Image: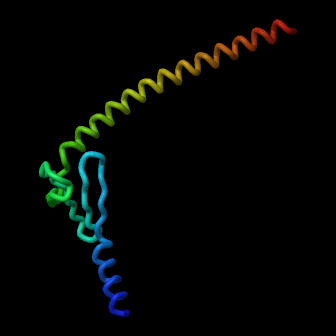
Amino acid sequence: MKIYVLIAILAQALCAQWVMFSDGVDTYLYNDQSGDVYVRYKKGGKNYEDAFIKMPAGIVPKVESRAESKRESIADKTTESSKKQNLEAIQKSQELLRQSIDSSSLLE
């Protein structure tokens, strides 16, 4: 019984260093201890036929650079639209303030 528990603890310690995650397009395996990253290579068949290929250290996939440029363009668009929305909100609040001042002066 003690041997089974020891084997289970050892197996857990060996497997605990690996983390699997996905970015929606590719699946990755990451080793917590060594920092190695493996990318799933699709062979065109079933999922179990795919292989994991080790990524060289220091290389960033080109897909991420496209995603970053899209994020930057979206951020620029949102900043411009948010500035416009803020300006419109300020103008509306000033108009409402003027109307309330005008209506209060009529009541007196």
80 or 45: nearer the viewer: 45
Residue 11, position in %: x, y?
Answer: 30, 79
Residue 37, position in %: x, y?
Answer: 22, 60
Q: Quadrant of the C terminus?
A: top right
Residue farthest to the front? Answer: 46
Number of marks in the rendered image: 0
62 sits to left or right of 14: left
52 or 56: nearer the viewer: 52
Q: Quadrant of the N terminus?
A: bottom left
Query: Which residue is painted at 38% across and 27% down in the image?
Result: 77
Residue farthest to the left? Answer: 43
84 sits to left or right of 32: right
Among the 4 quarters of the image, the one containing residue 2: bottom left
Query: Which residue is painted at 35% across and 31% down in the image?
Result: 74
Depicted 71 relative to depicted 39: above or below: above
Depicted 74 relative to depicted 17: above or below: above
Query: Which residue is painted at 33% across and 92% down in the image?
Result: 3
Query: Which residue is painted at 26% across and 62% down in the image?
Result: 30
Depicted 67 relative to depicted 106: above or below: below
Residue 35, position in %: x, y?
Answer: 24, 65
Residue farthest to the right? Answer: 108
